Image: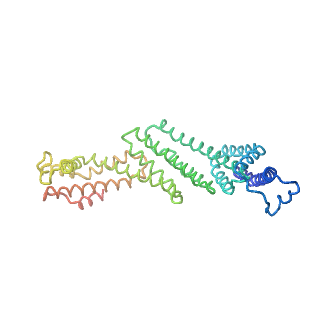
Amino acid sequence: MVSEAYSNMLKIFIPLLVDESSFFAHFMCFEGIDNKDDDDDLEIMDPDGNDDKPEITSSELGALNEALKDLLDGIQEDFYAIIDWAWKVDPLRCISMYGLTERYLSGQKTDAAGFVRKLLDDLRSKIISQFNKFIDEVCHQIERNERNVRPPIGVLSYMTKFENLASRMEHNIQGQSRDMVDKAYSKLVGAMFNTLEKIAETDSKSFDIVLIENYAAFQNSLYELANAVSSLAKFYHLASESYEQACTRLCNSVINLQFDKLISFHQKVDELRLRCGKSNEEIPFQQGLSKSDLRKVLKYSLTGIDRSFNLMYKKLVKSLTTEELLPSIWIKCKKEFLDKYAAFVEMVLKIYGNEPVTPVAEIKELIASL
């Protein structure tokens, strides 16, 4: 009903104001430009518009619009009152009012109805200002979460509530209000993601867990809407990238915890080869990297590998508060380990020749059943 009231005001009053302006302009131009005798009045007011007036100059147009302002000034307050009322009832109504205003504005020319164009332009500016005030307040509410959250953090409420807000915003879009809404999305999601990162940083041990659970919740809630709205799809993919990066870091941390000697051995070899320029033949003669050292590392790392994976799994179960994420993250952990182990085997074959090492396929088959 609020949008209806504003729509009706524009529908009724804008044509009236245009007509009033046009009549006033015709009258003033006749008096100020032609300076003809009264007998010529009928020629000037020819209903077919074929009058003999000269074109109005810019200075005359300026004077005319100043006169129109004196005549009509004050009526804009009634329009402002409707906008203020709409903002108090539902700030998102600003979106539809903006679209309506743009539609009327695009139909106005910079001519005798200059006052009407300025009125519409002022209405548009006020609507944008009111809408931005609402978006800023929502952003402040999101940012206040940083001060109030205490561990365990879990999923932040605003990460799932955004979908409801975005749906309502989409419902209010009319005409050319798409750009205004997309800018609001950028501001809101920027505040959401920045605040999330800051909250996650308050506890280094759960940093990636907090990111994983919140980016997953954001994606799950926004999935359908992101498929329909391209500007929201951009933020969905951004959350997806951040989710994958956090998952990779988490998997690496639990793998390194159980297979630190295997990972460390490989890193030392890479450092000597890539940073120090050691040849493959020289590596086995370096301290801590002999064939004997390799055998010890393999035995330590692969003996009881099922127990190591069991501890990795328990670590994830204990860390995650969102249980439904566990299966996919566990699969990723297995894949990350296999990738690391495959790279390790490739390194062994290059540098240590025929030194026995358990094939990747055998390890893959073993952990698949875990």
Query: Residue 183: percent from the left, percent from the top?
Result: 54, 50
Return the residue found at the far top.
Answer: 147
Q: Which colour scheme is used?
A: rainbow
Q: Which residue is drawn at 75% across and 48% down?
A: 64
Q: In which quarter of the image is the C terminus?
A: bottom left
Quarter of the view holding residue 204: top left
Residue 117 x/y as whole percent? 69, 51
Q: Locate residue 194 relative to residue 12 in the image: left or right.
A: left
Q: Residue visible at 73% across and 49% down? A: 60
Q: How many labels does the image show?
A: 0
Whether residue 76 sits left or right of residue 148 in the image: it is right
Residue 178 in the image: above or below residue 202: below
Report whether 66 appears left or right of 167.
right
Measured as percent of width and height from the top left, residue 139 is found at 53, 42
Position of residue 39 in the picture relative to residue 166 (left or right): right
- The residue closer to the viewer here, 322 or 126, is 126
Residue at far left of view: 285
Residue toward you, 185 or 345? 185
Residue nearer the viewer, 85 or 297:
85
Which residue is depicted at the point 41% across and 48% down? Answer: 212
Residue 357 position in % (x across, y down): 17, 57
Q: Residue furthest right?
A: 39
